[in-house]
Image (tube, rainbow, N blue to C red):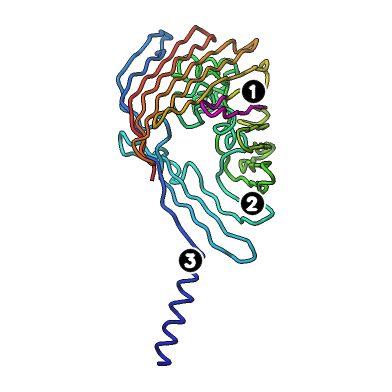
Amino acid sequence: MKKTLIALAVLAVSGAAMAQSSVTLYGVADAMVGSKEANSVNAAGVVTKLRQTVIDSNGLSSSRWGLRGTEDLGGGMKAVFVLESGLSIDTGAAASTSSLFNRQAFVGLDSSFGTVSLGRQYSAYDSVRGTFLSAQGNSTSFDATNSATINTALLTGLTSGATALQALATVNSYGGRIGAWTGYQTRIDNSIRYATPNISGFQAAVVYGLGENKAANVDPTKNASFSLTYANGPIGVAVTHADDELIQDFHLKNTAIGGSYDFGIAKAFLSYNKAKITGIAKQNEWAVGARAPIGAATLVAQYAQSKGDDLGKSTSFGLEGQYSLSKRTTAYAAFNSTKVEILNDAKNSVFGLGVRHTF
């Protein structure tokens, strides 16, 4: 009898401990078949317009898998972690060959005072853009507020001695750019993030990235961003700022304000962003869009523009038709047309039919 009671007690304690901890496998599998048209330039500087049929991994969302976990530490405090990796459904390859968890990798503590986390994380700017500033979200390949400036091609141009204008012009005109806005650093390495608890609909967050690339007589590059949001009932409003130091003393700064209002028959979005790049005149950017649910279907439309004295004018229009086959599976048809008036009048477009499954 005593042995039985002891065994039951051990099982009870073990069960309680397991109930206080959880690890969840989650992800998104998204693939589409479609057509892309974009300018291309060869080594001789000859520009051609290329159109090709593609099967792409990322349509409405970037394909990924990840692990997230929590442990109840008592007293209202929890340990939290996320490990998330991108992947290509069309080839089965990892999205990054240099990082296993290229999308997110952080650990932290959550309590009634907020959440503090350390690792590779989304900037505070990125965390609110898809919810408050863009009707299409910030993962879709058809988003009119997307950009193609913060990537390897831009950084290669800057570090090889090209001026900022030359580097941006090359990327914007010949990079197959979809979306009008200038861009920003999405994820921050070696970062610390603090987010306040939700207080009557208000919430704030700040992310600071320690650029661990200091060298002799060279200061490290750093990233800083913050956001303040309000979401209550049909209203959603956000103010956010990001200062990305891409290379030493070369900054890309974005300051945005925007929001949404849910009228029931449709949810309308309006946003404004000011992008400032070192040595280049500021870009004034705005977007207007709407999401309209019709039964199991949702129609999404958005128009965005970016305009400045040095980088010229960019315009983009995105249109999506989504149909929920279930709570986790969505079929879609989507289109985007983007015109970039810098260096030459580059016009890019993409059309796709696809399916997205979340798990």
Q: Position of residue 81 (x, y in %)?
A: 53, 54
Mark seen at residue 273: 1
Foreground residue among 133 and 146: 133
Mark seen at residue 19: 3
Residue found at x 61% / y 45%: 191
Secondary structure under the numbered disc 1 in the rendered image: strand
Q: Is residue 188 above or below residue 143?
A: below
Q: Position of residue 215 (x, y in %)?
A: 64, 40
Label 3 Cα neighbours within 10 Å, binned few <14 / some 14-19 / many ≥20: few
Secondary structure under the numbered disc 2 in the rendered image: strand
Q: Is residue 184 above or below residue 341?
A: below
Residue found at x 41% / y 52%: 25
Magenta residues (range): 254-268
Q: Is residue 67 above or below residue 240?
A: below
Secondary structure under the numbered disc 3 in the rendered image: helix
* Membership of 266 in magenta stretch: yes
Determine contact: label 2, label 1, CB under 8 Å: no
Residue found at x 54% / y 24%: 160
Q: Main secondary structure of the magenta part?
A: strand
- The number of callouts visible is 3
The Cα atoms of the two marked residues, 3 and 2, are separated by 23 Å
Q: Nearer the viewer, mark 3 or mark 2?
A: 3
Is residue 137 left or right of 306 when viewed as pictured? left
Per the image, the residue denoted by label 2 is 116
* Membership of 265 in magenta stretch: yes
Is residue 156 left or right of 198 when viewed as pictured? left
Image quadrant containing the N terminus: bottom left
The Cα atoms of the two marked residues, 2 and 1, are separated by 27 Å
Q: Position of residue 293 (x, y in %)?
A: 46, 28
Q: Quadrant of residue 352?
A: top left
Query: Tag 3: residue type?
Result: Ala
Q: Point out the tag, 3 or 2, that comes first from the N-terminus.
A: 3
